[in-house]
Image (tube, grey):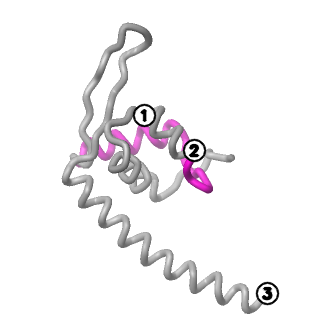
Amino acid sequence: MNCSKHSRHTNAFILLFLQKSSPAYGAQILSSLQTELPYCLTDSPSVYRSLQEMEKKYWVKSHWETQDIGPPRKWYCITPEGQVALHDYAEDIRQRHANFNYFLTHYSLIFE
């Protein structure tokens, strides 16, 4: 699976994952995106940039945890502001989905 492209909805997918599985750390989020999405359109730098951006907007909050073995991990949780953003993304995606369905329906009528 090619994850080298950047998705305009990376934040939406991260927020959705955090809503389902909060708290989570960055590598765990990326792994879930890569395994759960039919087409992964993001990579590690994009995930961490998105998390930083969302933290500045107060959509996610984080804390560090140290373990006996391995490096410290930064854990992320969705905030109430992040839930509002997640709902806004859902509406945006619903509208785009309707337009994409229109396109694919008419494309199929022309070429199939």
Task: Say which amino acid is labelled 2.
Answer: Gln
Residue shown at the point (37%, 67%) measured from the top left: 90
**First along the sequence among labels 1 and 2:** 1
| Quadrant placement of the C terminus | bottom right
Element on which disc 1 rests:
helix
Residue 75 lies, in percent from the top left, at 32, 31
Q: Residue 14 colored magenta?
A: no
- Position of 21 relative to 74 (above/below): below
**First along the sequence among labels 1 and 3:** 1
What numbered label is drawn on residue 111?
A: 3
Dot 1 alpha-carbon crowd within 10 angstroms: few under 14, some 14 to 19, many 20 or more: some
The residue at which mark 1 appears reads as 26
Find the distance from the CA under tag 3 to the CA under tag 2.
32 Å
Q: For this view, does 1 lie left or right of residue 44? A: right
Residue 69, by quadrant, is: top left
The residue at which mark 2 appears reads as 34
Element on which disc 3 rests:
helix
Find the distance from the CA under tag 1 to the CA under tag 3.
42 Å
Find the distance from the CA under tag 1 to the CA under tag 2.
12 Å
- Segment colored magenta: 36-57
Is the Cβ of the residue at disc 1 closer than 8 Å to that at disc 3?
no
Residue shown at the point (36%, 41%) measured from the top left: 51
